[in-house]
Amino acid sequence: MTLATFTYLVHCPSCEEPKMVPRALSTQPAVFRCGKCRNYFFLLRRRIGPSATRFPKKAGLVRTTAVTKFRGYYGVVERTLDGYDVMLLDLNRQPLTPRVHMRRLDQIYDYKQPFRKILKDPEKLTRLIIGLQQASRDLTVPEDKKPKKTKKTEASQHELEDVLVEEAGFYTAHPAGDRTADGRYVLEYTTAPRKDDPITKLNTLAWLNRETGERGIVPFDDRARSIKIEDKTFYLLKEIDTETGVQNLLSTSGLKKWMDKNYAPDPHETWNQVLTFCKKYVYFMDPESYYVLAAWIIATYFFYNMSTFPYLNPIGPAEMGKTTVLRIARQLAYHANAITIPREASVFRSVDAYLCTLLNDEGDNIINYDSGIQDIFNSGFQKGARVPREFPLGDGTFKTRYFDAYSPKMITSKRPLPDMVDSRAIKLFMRGQPPKGIDYGQYEDELVDLKTGEALRDDLYVLRLLLQNKFIEEYQKINFYQEQKIRGREALLFKPLVAVVRVFCPTRLEEEQIIKAAMQHGELRRVSRHALREAKATKAILAVLKEDHPKDFDKLQEACRDYLAGKPKEESLLQEIALTNKEIHDKYTELFQSHIAPRDKGYLSVEGMSRLLQQTMGHHGVRKRVRTIIIPFGRLIHDVLTYELYDEIGVEEPETGEADLLPLMAPTTGDKTKTDVSEEKPLAAICSDCRFWNTKECVEEKPSLTTPTATYARNCSGFQPKKRLQT
């Protein structure tokens, strides 16, 4: 079997150099390089047998089958079942023209002979090429295929008049719903069908002028940059279009209600309707959970003007109603968007453009999501969290664009969420069975249909426009530290919910239920905080001091009481005590892991205790005969306050929040009163870098762990306590 059986002989269209082409490649779109002139030439896939690409073996002026190079292009003619096709390619083998069909060969040349004979005759082949060149003059290059010449302009300096300093006469607003900075206008986004084409929708903004009471709607096209409301121009911060993916916007009937200037739903009646809606479709064993769910749903309509907003986490075993809670939120929550398998780009783009309330029914898989999704859930509870992305420009450079990740989020799960997300969420425990005779499964079809909650949802959108300013004012008045003795993360999570019941409910019953849920949530969080290894290690240290070093424990108690009273003594805070790593570990084992075998995965070894105390908790270790841990009183007091170990240290829990105790001011003498805060100087604060208690000699003002007004040492690594108490 010869080589010719598997190859064809082709010739370069530029220099006529012969080249052997495998038979398999001759039937596929392929590019070949000439070994003489180093140019590339192209063969199209043949459509009818080998005769379209085979070449005569006799010598003479032979070329590739209807492929020729002229005027910087490749001209290609290919035989088909009913004629020939002509097409132009550039030198990079990219099509410049579409395939043009020639039904008869005499449209190119005069002879009506088989194509194979033309290739054998040099004279006829030359005329074919000439005819092809003439025919190609009528084939124009498409506009999108022409190379675009971009002229790079140099950056120039502008005049002072080009800078806009005064903002009178216009506003900037988010098109998905916003409130102007001066509180004059409130906007809400929806879509409405065109009058001449009801299938096509228009973007629509419902607006309210709080000063005059005027209201109306403004339709605009996709990706509009500005709109006119009354005599003011509103520049839109985001590009928005009608393909939102959000299905529970303000309905057409809701727009009709809004156009009636006298229409204003009663807030308390609307609250009762939302609460009744929740009680109808889902069962909670804890009555306060209904109030938390109803308040959270209403609060989503005001989230954009708050600095933080809590997540909601329905948690419980299978078939306990977690998905039902999510469907209730899909019916009533603000711009609800249910997602099952989220992707990073879809999440932050939908939140950025449409301010969606994200409903995720796969919370147990968050730990398996990619890092971008986890970052969005970790940081999306507070305003200002942005996701940067790079977009290529035409000149080869990139432009950074930022997307907002802040929005309300509901995440259902069977188990606790990851720590970072769990600390930002209010838990709704799904447990227990409903009373006999009540079947919640009969309402499944109603919850799927968004028409079920449309009227109530429209009233919530209208109340958002009417009560936006009142809600913000009430939200700013709330002080959990002074009113309810609730501090920390619980105060941050439940503050929007309390603002809702104060605006929508005239009685205190609803607020009492929310406060009760906040206290229970705080107690649960305290229990979980006590279960941390750092808290257990602090308990073990306190137990060792109490049993083996009672004098030092009494001094620590006194220093802690002085600190809680607002009169810390510098000498007490800077004292240190040295304990061996072994005695701390023995007490830790006695208290928390006596039932755990040393080989068990959850057992904390002596080496693990040393790493925990030094690397995680920041205590200083010294290697003598045995490993010794140096523990400053100030740092130990800080750990006691962090993990709320008041019973373990034997002091009463303060009635005020930790933020009210710091900064620690020097005591005043003589006629100087405490009202002169400008001349007072902090005695001590905890450094945000090294966590040492610093003295009054600290001069550089930087935020500390406990208060943004405290100061700490300029060189933390060189700071050494003045006294050390050895045992």
Image: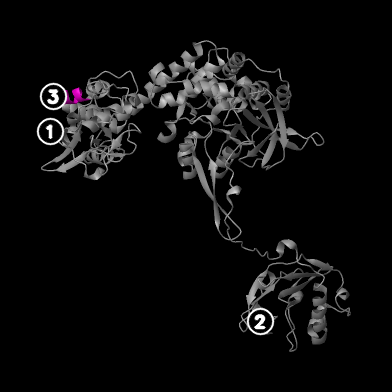
Residue under numbered circle 2: 4
Of labels 1 and 3, the one closer to you: 1
* Residue at image location 89% in from the left, 79% down from the top: 110
Q: Which residues are magenta?
A: 549-559
Does 384 appear above or below 185? below
Which of pointers 2 and 3 lies earlier in the amino acid sequence? 2
Q: What percent of the width, then of the height, locates residue 6?
A: 65, 77
Q: In 3D space, how far apart are the residues under numbered discs 2 and 3 (Cα atoms)?
A: 101 Å
Magenta-colored segment: predominant secondary structure: helix
Residue under numbered circle 3: 550
Q: In 3D space, how far apart are the residues under numbered discs 1 and 3 (Cα atoms)?
A: 14 Å
* Residue at image location 43% in from the left, 31% down from the top: 422
Q: In 3D space, how far apart are the residues under numbered discs 2 and 1 (Cα atoms)?
A: 97 Å
Instruction: Residue type at mark 3: give it.
Output: Pro
Does 705 appear above or below 556? below
Check whether the beta carbons of the residues at disc 1 and disc 3 lie within 8 A of each other.
Answer: no
In this view, the residue in front, 282 or 675, is: 675
